[in-house]
Amino acid sequence: MRVIHILFQKDKTIKFTFKEQKEFEQIDGFIEAKERELEVVNEKINNSGSDFVQLQQLIVEQDNIKKELELLMERWTYLNELDEQIRSLKNQN
């Protein structure tokens, strides 16, 4: 007779690391600051007139800010999904 061993994995507790918790608490402020920075650059672009060199620099800066904002938003999504999972597990227990 063959004996079958079934291994049960304990439910891993999902939680924020210290760094993630701190980031979760601060990320909304980081996003707001980056959005304000983008608004300022957009305003400078609109007011740059015929200064082509300044306009090029501002467009590069605008692109960089948009990329940073996109990364922040991706991180915000991850942290909020993790928070939802943590809350869901707490509610089940």
Image (cartoon, grey):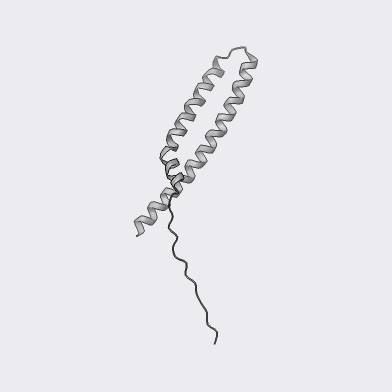
| 93 displayed left or right of 36 | left
Residue 44 position (above or below residue 36) = above
Kindly indicate the quadrant of the structure image that contains residue 10. Answer: bottom left
Total number of numbered discs in the rendering: 0
Residue 79 position (above or below residue 12) = above
Residue at the far front in the pictured view:
18
Residue at the far bottom in the pictured view:
1
Q: Position of residue 62 (x, y in %)?
A: 57, 26
Quadrant of the image containing the C terminus: bottom left
Residue 3 position (above or below residue 85) = below
* Residue drawn where x is 61% and y is 16% of the image: 54
Q: Position of residue 81 (x, y in %)?
A: 45, 48
Q: Position of residue 76 (x, y in %)?
A: 47, 41
* Residue drawn where x is 42% and y is 45% of the image: 21
| 15 displayed left or right of 69 | left
Quadrant of the image containing the N terminus: bottom right
* Residue drawn where x is 61% and y is 18% of the image: 55
Q: Position of residue 35 (x, y in %)?
A: 48, 29
* Residue drawn where x is 46% and y is 33% of the image: 30
Residue 1 position (above or below residue 42) = below
| 33 displayed left or right of 59 | left
